[in-house]
Amino acid sequence: MKIITSTIKCRTALQLARSSHQRIAFVPTMGNLHDGHLRLVQEAKQIADCVVVSIFVNPLQFGVGEDFERYPRTETEDQAKLKAAGVDVLFQPSVSDIITPNMHTVVSVKGLSDLHCGAFRPGHFDGVATIVCKLFNIVQPHTALFGLKDFQQLAIIRAMVNELNIPVQLIGIETVREDDGLAMSSRNDYLTGKERAIAPLLYQTLCTARTAVQNGAQNYHEIERQAVADLTQAGFQVDYFTICRYDNLQKAHADDHELVILTAARLGKTRLIDNLEVHR
Ligand code: PAF
């Protein structure tokens, strides 16, 4: 596995791969890799000759008072996992290589970025879209893979790619879960033992809501209210629990058929997100 830490060297290495007609698949990450990330790598290996993973803890997507400083940085373990998974190139730039001083440009996917998580984390998705756009321009992959756990993130990146004509094919990969249903996330490491025992309730509550919708319940507001009440009772502070249209993430109506239930809730200092698609 080639480890590249500079933007210029990354460009040169991948231009070489491209000119020898290799297909490049790209998995952007912030490190602290778990099986969810490795699933993305496995899928990437199926479809490409050259698999590139980036590790970059992106300061632009953390708000004031969020966990940028304490975000787990596990470089040695991450490198070993990626090497064992057969990754060809690890791009691990420094902050100063990516975030130029006095940056003027922000990629803002308006209308999608201020919903749901965006309402609770102002500026977060602008930070994500800006950095992903930069990484796409540096790596210039044929395909990029993202986890569906971050459903809203992928919807925003999809809109950006379509509307800015970025020539990248996007693939969303199913959320990988622990045996008890908890969606894998780098932030699960923050949970105390007690919180970890409660955490799977987020997924269970999504499953209960999905069953109600699939069984024909139409009062979405009541399903959402009950879910928030159940989670709050168990010790969560719920940011939102919303039944949305799958295509535009707006609140769903009773006659919509392609839905996604999105939720974010905090347990102590840890913010968890999860979602479930519903087709009815
Ligand atoms: O999902 C993540 O890990 C990050 O938001 C991403 C896509 C790597 C951008 O920093």
Image: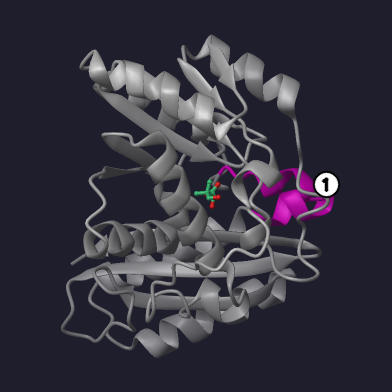
Magenta segment boundaries in residue numbering: 184-199
Amino acid type, callout 1:
Gly
Give the side of residue 113 with respect to residue 166, left or right.
right
- Label 1: few (<14), some or many (≥20) within 10 Å? few
Number of disc labels: 1
Q: Is residue 119 magenta?
A: no
Residue beneath label 1, please?
193
Q: Is residue 190 magenta?
A: yes
Asked where in the image residue 7 lies, by quadrant, the reply is: top right
Q: Percent position (x, y) of residue 182?
A: 57, 47
Quadrant for the C terminus in the image: bottom left
Query: Ligand 1: does it lie within 8 Å of the C-beta at label 1?
Result: no
Q: Is residue 24 above or below residue 106?
A: above
Q: Is residue 172 above or below residue 85?
A: below
- The residue sitting at 43% across, 29% down in the picture is 11
Q: Percent position (x, y) of residue 77?
A: 71, 21
